[in-house]
Amino acid sequence: MPITAVDVEPALSSWVGLDGSCVRLINHSENLIFRIDTPVLGSFVLRVHRPGYQSRASIESELAWLMALRRDTTLPISEPIIGRDGALLQSFETPHGERLAVLFRFAPGQEPSPHSDLDDLFRTLGGYAAELHDHVSAWTPPERFERQVWQAASILDPDGLWGDWRIAPGVENSHRLVLEELSDALRGQLKAYGTEADRYGLIHADMRLGNLLVDGDRVTLIDFDDCGFCWFMFDFAAAISFHETHAAVPALRAAWLEGYLAIRPLSAEDIAAMDAMVMLRRMALLAWIGSHAETVLAQQHTPGFADGTVQLAVRFLRGPIWS
């Protein structure tokens, strides 16, 4: 059972100035997200972590990268707030057991609509991804840095990080035959592509529309909770999450590449690998929908998602997804 706004009120004492705040749930996807409106200090966002997904060490590693990015770059990203004890990560007791939580300063803006003109936004996202990848290529993580690995096995195997796509809603026997063929093709292509440092490293891994706040010309990138080790081009695949079949995707791909290439070079092999990244991410989302059926996001995208995945798989197996 999810915890409520009342359940998180005891956690507020972990930070200065939150006493007497108004607390309300604003999102439930992987984690529970509460908006905290204070009488004096303005607004904040409290992320309460889903039990059993990220460990304490993994969350602390995410925050280490986030703080390094805030120190070393000008990227508009989430600002975590230090607690009374000097730590960014806090824990508190609820009726359902201990929970881990991080407080962020509230950032203004709205999630962009997938049905709006997104070319300029994707040009910006391509630039953000290139800056993140440049930073990682030069950054030395602290000792005991620990984040998940997004590779073929950790997504496609039955015990994948987000669950087993084989038992996702809508996956029938006819779907499985095509998707098993896709799985084999992806494993082979990604093994051949390799994990050299120029194409693989720590990435955001979830730079989708739901993790963007657009406020005029400012685009704030939030939610590094899924950051992990993966191919750099996977950040494009994540950007079109749940909308891979949309007719605008080829234009968005071109805009994303334009923004990326203005900052960081790519080889023809990198660009050719983008289709495989899109299919790998789509398979991850198919598994996620099945393992997170209680969330509104999963429920919104369940109808037709398996069918759309098979349609994309057939196109991928025959050649480029977008000719």
Image: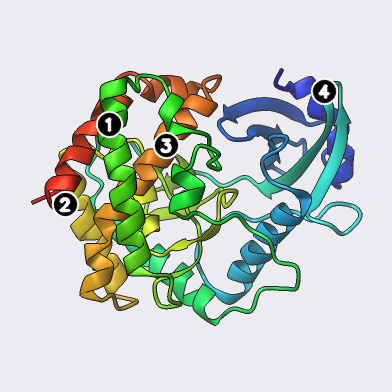
- Helix, strand or loop status at disc 2: helix
In front: label 4 or label 3 = 3
Disc on res. 177: 1
- Helix, strand or loop status at disc 1: helix
Q: CA distance from mark 4 to mark 1?
A: 41 Å
Disc on res. 96: 4
In front: label 1 or label 3 = 1
Disc on res. 251: 2
Q: Which residue is mark 3?
A: 285
Q: Position of residue 252 (x, y in %)?
A: 22, 51
Disc on res. 277: none
Say left or right for 28 vs 168: right
Say left or right for 10 vs 167: right
* Vertical position of residue 311 compared to residue 149: above or below: above
Q: CA distance from mark 1 to mark 3?
A: 18 Å
Q: Residue placed at 32% from the left, 52% from the top?
A: 186
In front: label 1 or label 2 = 1
Name the kind of residue labelled 2 in the image: Ala
Residue 229 or residue 50, whichever sits in front: 229
The 10 Å Cα crowd at callout 3, few under 14, some 14 to 19, many 20 or more, is many
- Marks 1,2: beta carbons within 8 A: no
In front: label 2 or label 4 = 4
Mark 2 vs 4, N-terminal side: 4
The 10 Å Cα crowd at callout 2, few under 14, some 14 to 19, many 20 or more, is few
The 10 Å Cα crowd at callout 4, few under 14, some 14 to 19, many 20 or more, is few
Mark 2 vs 3, N-terminal side: 2
Mark 4 vs 3, N-terminal side: 4
Q: Residue placed at 75% from the left, 68% from the top?
A: 144
Q: Position of residue 55 (x, y in %)?
A: 74, 48
Name the kind of residue labelled 1 in the image: Leu
* Residue 192 makes an appearance in the image: yes
Mark 1 vs 3, N-terminal side: 1
